[in-house]
Amino acid sequence: MSLPKDSKARKAVPLFRGCMSYFPDALAAIAELSHKGNEKHNPGEPLHWSREKSGDHADCIARHLIDSGPEHTAVDPEDNVLHIVKVAWRACALAQIAIEQSREKCKPEKRPPDYSVGSIVRQHPKVTGVMREMAEAESRRLVKSFGGTD
């Protein structure tokens, strides 16, 4: 999902009030983890997500969830980050990828052409005119059958 272009629709996606204000500490921890991960996997490069370096997000979520402990307060000794923050980062990555894939599947140019008879018939102007005439004739017949006039 990307942000809607329509202002009314954008108001239904309250990023600050509906996300950032709910989870400020968690989001800050995720951002800090992004920075640490960039320093580890892309030293000296500007902050960016190297998607090609890790794609096993679901497995990592499960591993970090187990490692987070029963109270979800265990810290990864490698970088001093809560395992549960790593779960959240991986969950965001997994959600982002799924949303992008879903969006790609829904693009009109990705949909197969509609070769149904109805679709082909509706696109032909002569057929459309004949169908309109038939519908009008049927409408007149029905009106007469119920005692009306046309």
Image (spheres, rainbow, N blue to C red):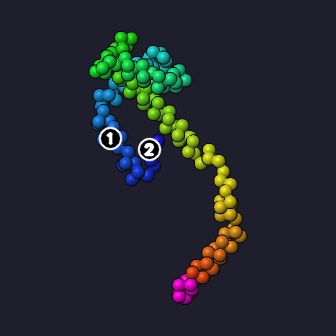
The residue identified by callout 1 is 18
Q: Is residue 84 left or right of residue 44?
A: left
Q: Residue at x 68, y 63 (%)?
A: 121
Tag 2 near tag 1, CB within 8 Å: no
Magenta stretch: helix, strand or loop mostly = loop
Judged from the image, the secondary structure of the residue bearing numbered disc 2 is loop
| Visible residue check, residue 32 | no
Give the residue type at disc 1. Gly
Q: How far from the left and from the top, in percent, is residue 13?
A: 38, 45
The disc at residue 31 is none
Q: Residues within 10 Å of mark 1 (few under 14, many from 20)?
A: few
At a point 68% along the width and 73% down the height, the residue shown is 130
Residue 12 percent coordinates (x, y): 37, 48
Where does the magenta region start and end? 143-150
Give the position of the C terminus as an image quadrant: bottom right
Give the residue drawn at x 32%, y 28%: 26
Q: Is residue 148 magenta?
A: yes
Considering only vertical position in the picture, is 44 above or below 90?
A: above
Sequence-first tag of 2 and 1: 2
Residue 42, position as x, y percentages in the image: 49, 18
Q: Which mark is residue 3?
A: 2
Q: Is residue 19 visible?
A: yes
Q: Separation of disc 2 and disc 1 at Cα?
A: 14 Å
- Which type of secondary structure does the marked residue at label 1 adopt? helix
Hey, which quadrant is residue 24 in on the image?
Answer: top left
Mark 2 Cα shell of 10 Å, populated few (<14), some (14-19), many (≥20): few
Q: Position of residue 111 (x, y in %)?
A: 62, 47
Amino acid on which the number 2 mark rests in the picture: Leu
- Which sits in the foreground, 87 or 117? 117
Residue depth check, mark 2 versus mark 1: number of the one nearer the observer: 1
